[in-house]
Image (tube, rainbow, N blue to C red):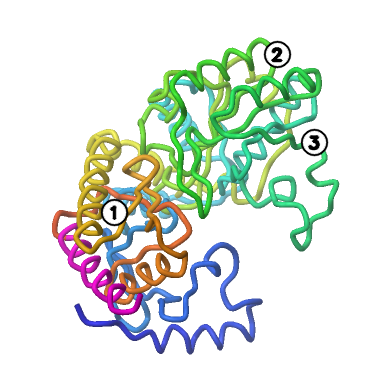
Amino acid sequence: MSVYKMKKSHNLLEKAKEVIPGGVFGHYKYAIRDTGPVFFSKAKGAHFWDIDDNKYIDLMCAYGPAILGYNHPEVDEAAKSQYGLGNTVSLASPVMVDLATTLVEMVDAAEWALFGKNGGDSTNLAVMVARAATGKEKIVKVRDGYHGATPWMQEKGRPGTVSSDANHVLTVEWNDLESFEEILVNHSDEIACFISSPYNHPVSRDNELPAEGYWQKVSALCKQHGIVLIVDDVRAGFRINLAGSNVAYGFTPDLICFGKAIANGYPLSALVGSNALKEAAEEVYFTGTQFFSAAPMAAAIATLLELKKSDAANKMNDYGKKLKSSLIETADEFGYKFIASGVPAMPYFRLAEVETKVHFSWIDECVKRGVYMLGYHNHFISTAHSEEDLATIIQVAKEAFTILKKNY
């Protein structure tokens, strides 16, 4: 495979820095590498092209949203049709009711639904509903668990935050029932909710599935102490089980937060919950001007129907298993130990038993040859990834390992 050049991307980055702090804002800026692309020109299916006209197999899927691939025809047509009727209008569209009905029918724990734009909207709303329902203030979360960029979720000391932002946030270790029980003993009369992803997928660390019986015990303890159980399914939603990731692990939460893949890239998030919390959800004030945009809701209905029709969760996990085994086998051929943790549809990749710089070098070599990955984040499979893509990924991986052997 030829090695890509990204001159236009990096020239534009320098220009961008004149008018945008850092040149690229938010989590996208952390993906910028000296030898990697920065700006895209177009996207289709499981691929995107950078502004230097290099084509990539995308294993990030826009950090998760493109679950059906970019520019999916049925999804885009649904959004286009709704745009023709109206998008953000002075009244809500009936499509909002249709989407809520679709979610209630599809998601096992859902008896109602509310909508926002980003995953952080749904997680913040979930916490507010829990506080309104319980009259308590404190939030319990897993160490390194990520639930949005709002100040209460950020690490202490980050610019723009103050120490009091996290005053009501308590932390437990993942899969550690003892630490969870201990914090309940000390604070149960103060805790409004426990929020966690269905399995632990922190940044820059191997992902970890729940231990046998973990969620059943957590669920029972939350019920015993009157604590609202919130599953943050923003990242993993619809990739493990279309009825909610919790179904795969055998428990029922009170609230589930969705985002990312719910509308295949159109800006939308959702909070679904049980009727026991419906009154509290009605009482909480949480809104945004664009929350009621109708086109993304139409896109979400089309996305959910297509996911169901194509048995998407099983399809993506089957593909992810083949990708995982192929990369492990390829790495072994070159004398490297390759780790792929988490669920197959959302794998976290790591070269083990080497320095971190070696792992990042392997990622960089893959990117320079047209396979877009990150060295510090889980990846995403879409239904658009093909067997041809898989063959190319393995070919590129072999070339990248060959370079590593020469350099380290």
Mark 3 Cα shell of 10 Å, populated few (<14), some (14-19), many (≥20): some
Residue 192: x %, y % from top left: 73, 25
Residue 329: x %, y % from top left: 20, 53
**For marks 2 and 3 on the same chain, the one whose residue lies earlier in the sequence:** 3
Q: Nearer the viewer, residue 284 or 109?
A: 109
Residue of label 2: 225
Residue 398: in magenta span:
yes
Q: Where's the N terminus, which quadrant?
A: bottom left
Distance Cα–Cα, label 3 vs label 1: 42 Å
Distance Cα–Cα, label 2 vs label 1: 45 Å
Q: Residue at x 52, y 43 (%)?
A: 269
Q: Amino acid at mark 2?
A: His
Q: Nearer the viewer, residue 375 or 290?
A: 375
Q: Main secondary structure of the magenta part?
A: helix
Q: Residue at x 39, y 55 (%)?
A: 352
> Does the CB distance between marks 2 and 1 fall below 8 Å?
no
Residue of label 3: 168
**Residue reaching furthest to the top:** 224
* Left or right for 259, reference 383: right
**What is the span of residues highlighted in magenta in the rendered image?**
389-408
Residue of label 1: 72
Q: Identify whether 359 is placed above or below 76.
A: below
Q: Residue at x 42, y 29 (%)?
A: 244
In the structure shown, which secondary structural element does the residue marked by tag 3 occupy? loop
Distance Cα–Cα, label 2 vs label 3: 17 Å
Q: Amino acid at mark 3?
A: His
Mark 1 Cα shell of 10 Å, populated few (<14), some (14-19), many (≥20): many
Q: Residue at x 43, y 38 (%)?
A: 237
